[in-house]
Amino acid sequence: MVWMATPVHLVAGLTSVHLDRRSILRLSTEDLAALAKEFRRVFHDSGFVLEPLDSGDFLLLGPQIPVAQTSEPARAMGNSIADALGAGDPALRRLGAEIEMWLHEHPVNDARRRRGEAPVTGLWLWGGGPSPVPSDTHPASAASSDIAFGSDAYLEGLWASIGKKVFPLPQQLTDVFGYPEVQRAVLVIEIGPMLHPNPRWTFFDAVAQIDRAFIAPAVDALGAAKVERLVILANDHQLTLRARDRFKLWRRIPPGLSGLQ
């Protein structure tokens, strides 16, 4: 079995424990390696193993247990974690509690506090299922003209399954247009990592920056017929626009995100 294991900083309130907008952490390569090595030593007889990911998360590999219905941690921001984590399997819940105790006062967290970074108080275990059978062949040719940007763990896993690598998210959308051989591009833009280096930003400041750097330029490129189609996914909402939509003259669309609402 394999699960996503996302490092989180849980916030204790008066009546519940919850995630705030900066609770989802992306760890450095050094922190990932140190925690994975220590996990192998402490939990060596549990049957579970942590594998670091380039995205700053972990994969948790373990024995066969019933698949629990779990949600992505970003969906639980601002809410109590009790409902989001669900009932789950007792073995998985017990492991999660043991991981929290293991991380308490861990040397990695001591170093993070000294650097002014939020400590890792737990690993959010989610997206579990049977581990895929490794294959020596990848259908890379099926997506030879596709490219992906971002640090999302699921995106990296999907791209690895076709033998390709995800590129870091560019500073602005126009950088993507520097790949003329590419027919399709996907960008996964996460708000959490934008908030950590900008402590004064609110959620809406981050959304406004996404609008300026990515959404508005994408709409402009669509209007200039530089791209054929634009698909925007925001949580459970999807909007698809095509270049020919610019001929719908009876609709005057405001720029950027305001025109997509």
Image (spheres, grey):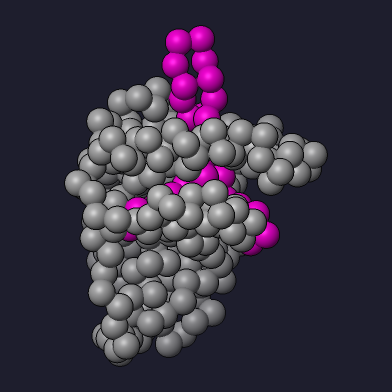
Question: Could you tell me residue 141's position as x and y percent?
Answer: 30, 90
Q: In which quarter of the image is the N terminus?
A: bottom left
**Quarter of the image holding residue 147?**
bottom left
Q: Which of 69 and 248 is in front in this view?
A: 69
Looking at the image, which residue is at 46% across and 25% down? Answer: 18
Farthest-out residue, right? 114
Res 182 → quadrant:
bottom left
Residue 144 screen position, x and y as percent = 35, 86
Q: Residue 105 vs residue 241: left or right?
A: right
Q: Which residue occupies 38% across, 67% down?
A: 157
Name which residue lies at 67% across and 34% down: 105
In the rendered view, tell whether residue 194 sits above or below residue 63: above
| Residue 5 magenta | yes
Q: Does 243 lie within the magenta span?
A: no
Position of residue 197 relative to residue 55, above or below, is above
User: In the image, which residues are magenta?
Assistant: 2-31
